[in-house]
């Protein structure tokens, strides 16, 4: 076998040298280096930003879910406690003075804690919920204290009539339905509904 050598080695080196110093090659080499630099720095930066945003969104979602759970627990517990007291004197066939006294004692023992917890939840809702929903929570608490709590205490203390207890029991049923609607509105505001959770 015979080796063949290029007869013009200087010519090939000249072509390579010319290509290396040409403006087109230098431009492409600079673009390649810039692309590598940007890719090396920008992609990790953007990825970190996305991860930070996702972590923040997860924290907010967990706080909203907890607040929804807390508000649901507070409102439903209150409505059951207040309804229990009026229930035992709202109808002559259901009348049970002893059960009503026990219900009133249970209500009286828990109402301060429930309303203070509710106040805390309203304060949290101001940062997590829309202003409209946090305002509704606050107004509903005022309505509960005015229309349910004060009349309940007055009727129990003054041995209210069957009609007064029946009227209060009916109101308590309506207020329970209103509480459930408010809970639903909070869930929609937080985008925590069965349609949104997958």
Image (cartoon, helix red, strand yellow):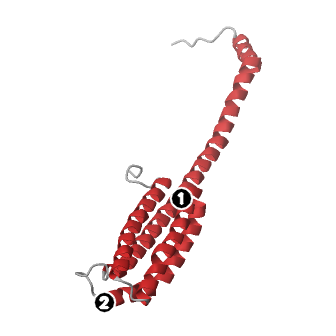
Q: Position of residue 184 (x, y in %)?
A: 42, 58
Mark found first going from the N terminus, 2 or 1 = 2
Q: Which residue is mark 2?
A: 97
Q: Is residue 105 left or right of residue 38?
A: left
Q: Position of residue 192 (x, y in %)?
A: 44, 55
Is label 2 in a helix, a strand or a loop? helix
Q: Position of residue 186 (x, y in %)?
A: 48, 59
Which residue occupies 56% across, 56% down?
132
Which residue occupies 62% across, 46% down?
44
* 10 Å crowding of disc 1: few (<14), some (14-19), many (20+): some
Q: Relative to residue 100, is residue 182 depicted above or below?
A: above
State whether residue 80 appears in this view.
no
Q: Relative to residue 56, is residue 164 depicted above or below?
A: below
Quarter of the figure with residue 142: bottom right
Q: Which residue is mark 1?
A: 133
Which label sits on residue 16?
Answer: none
Which residue occupies 53% across, 59% down?
133
- Looking at the rendered image, the disc whose residue lies closer to the viewer, 2 or 1, is 2
Q: Relative to residue 113, is residue 123 depicted above or below?
A: above
Quarter of the figure with residue 8: top right
Disc 2 from disc 1: Cα separation: 39 Å
């Amino acid at each position: 076998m015979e080796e063949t050598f290029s007869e013009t080695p200087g010519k090939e080196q000249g072509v390579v040298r010319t290509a290396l110093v040409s403006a087109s090659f230098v431009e492409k080499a600079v673009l390649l280096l810039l692309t590598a630099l940007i890719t090396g720095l920008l992609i990790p930066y953007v990825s970190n930003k996305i991860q930070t945003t996702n972590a923040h969104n997860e924290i907010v979602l967990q706080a909203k879910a907890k607040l929804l759970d807390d508000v649901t627990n507070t409102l439903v517990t209150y409505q059951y406690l207040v309804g229990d007291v009026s229930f035992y004197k709202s109808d002559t066939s259901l009348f049970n003075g002893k059960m009503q006294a026990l219900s009133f004692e249970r209500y009286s023992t828990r109402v301060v804690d429930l309303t203070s917890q509710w106040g805390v939840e309203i304060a949290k809702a101001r940062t997590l919920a829309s202003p409209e929903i946090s305002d509704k929570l606050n107004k509903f608490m005022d309505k509960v204290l005015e229309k349910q709590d004060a009349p309940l205490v007055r009727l129990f203390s003054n041995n209210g009539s069957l009609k007064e207890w029946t009227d209060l029991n009916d109101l308590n049923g309506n207020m329970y339905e209103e509480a459930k609607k408010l809970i639903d509105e909070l869930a929609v505001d937080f985008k925590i509904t069965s349609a949104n959770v997958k």
